[in-house]
Amino acid sequence: MSTPLKVKNLKTVDFSIDQMCTLYFYGKKIFRAVNDEYISQVEDMFDCGLISELIEKELFVNTWISDVEIEGYKLVIEHEYIEYWNYPYEWSFSMLHKAANVVLDANEVAFKHGYEIFDSHAYNVVFMMNKPVYVDFGSFIKRDVRNQNSWSGFSNFYNSFYIPLFLYKKGYADVPNNIFLYNGFYNDKDLFNLRYRYAGLFGKSISNLLYHIRFSKRRLASARYSRVIDKYGNHKHFEKLIRFKKAFQNNYSTKHARKLIGKIDRSSFDSYWKDYHDDKDPKNDKRFLRIKEIVTKHMADATSAVELASNQGKFANFLINNTHLSTMISTDYDKNALDQNFKVNGSQDNYLTLVHDFVRPNQRHNTSSFVDRIQGDVVIALAVTHHLILTQDVSLDHIFDTLENLSANYVIVEFMPLGLYFGDMNNIPKTPDYYSLEWFDSAFRERFEYILDEELAVNRHVFVGKCK
């Protein structure tokens, strides 16, 4: 028998409400140490077939009872390590929609085995490449049969999935991602005012009353009986509350949640770069073909790549399917372009799309930074440096810092000597005095181990290097 791991040598999360298990990290090992009072439930979750069915249907991260021991615990379970961890604020509309359906599918499986998911928020889902899986073992609870088809996780799901998707449909571009960057929820009253604007015609008092009735109805009807009893057991109107709950509880089911999500079939906001790749065909583009040759010839030992400003991902798709590279992380800050990227490449198990502004990255205070989670053997940034330098005042040092931090080995970056040139040689926009091929070349060689530079078109000059 191996020596138990000491808790003091393990990493854990700063904050957790999981009463079932304590999450521990040991290198690339992910453990959940089960608290004694939940051992029988955890064993039943494995014995009844719940976990095996979830894993078989690719709804839950691969999980097993571990032979590793942790001091102070009698039972330890282990999860498969997820290489490129990601968060809901890095998902596009279609990614969020797909994640929502994974939660609903997982909850249906749980119902079948006498359980349900109560903590059904989006941060409990992670994309393993472009396949979302539920990851929170501790949010499965025994289902109260008195609730019939009602789902105690309905309100969490409503706030974390339905509201952001609804806002996408209404044309709000940044609010859904900002919800996840803030606290993961959107004010329910604000949504009521947006959805039911007619309510304000009757005055503020009537509007507030209608909201309170609707909100309280959902909270009470979907709540677990144990919660209602604990909170209202001694209330003089307790029996009336229970009758009210029984009357409406089946309205807040997995089926109803799926119906709500099904009505939101598209996002309707506009964006500047959404059509940039519409006419791109890498297999017939000399520039793209040449960069593919460079990857093949000079980076034979590379297996993974990160493309920044990937737009619809046509070149990323071309590389992963026509070179030796086996993993592609394709990013862009334009949510529409990235969404199209996901729709085209979402079925590939070696491809991950993420919404990401690589010069102005966002994150929550309690989430890991992008560069701590995402890295590739090759980092690629095409047709973007001129925009960043000339229109957004981003320094070349900052751009190179980002490329260096994301790369485990190689860098491919384009420089546009003519700046914001749009094809008219008689009308070339003026560039600053410092902005020249020599300036870029000198900075590149200082930062990276030079491999080659080459003119690919009149305003396309590719630099290839290796991290020092």
Image (cartoon, rainbow, N blue to C red):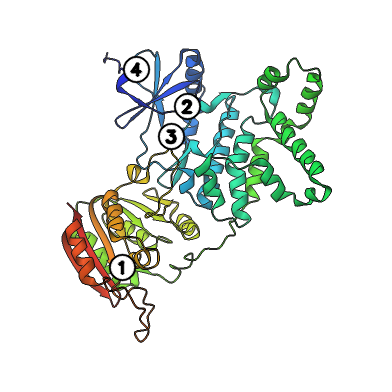
The x, y position of residue 165, in whole percent, is: 59, 49
* Amino acid type, callout 3: Val
* Amino acid type, callout 2: Ser
Nearer the N terminus, badge 3 or badge 1?
3
Residues packed near mark 4 inside 10 Å, few (<14), some (14 to 19) or many (20 plus): many
User: Is disc 2 in contact with disc 4, using a CB cutoff of under 8 Å?
Assistant: no
Nearer the N terminus, badge 4 or badge 3?
3
Residues packed near mark 2 inside 10 Å, few (<14), some (14 to 19) or many (20 plus): few
Local secondary structure at mark 4: loop
Label of residue 445 in the image: none
- Which quarter of the picture shows residue 366? top left
User: Is disc 4 in contact with disc 1, using a CB cutoff of under 8 Å?
Assistant: no
Nearer the N terminus, badge 2 or badge 4?
2
Instruction: Give the label, 2 or 4, closer to the camera.
Output: 2
The answer to whether residue 59 shows anywhere in this view is: no
Q: Separation of disc 4 and disc 1 at Cα?
A: 51 Å
**In-front residue for pair 435/126:** 435
**In-front residue for pair 84/453:** 453
Identify the residue position indicated by label 2 in the image.
16
Instruction: Give the label, 2 or 1, closer to the camera.
Output: 2
Q: Separation of disc 2 and disc 4 at Cα?
A: 19 Å
Label of residue 61 in the image: 3
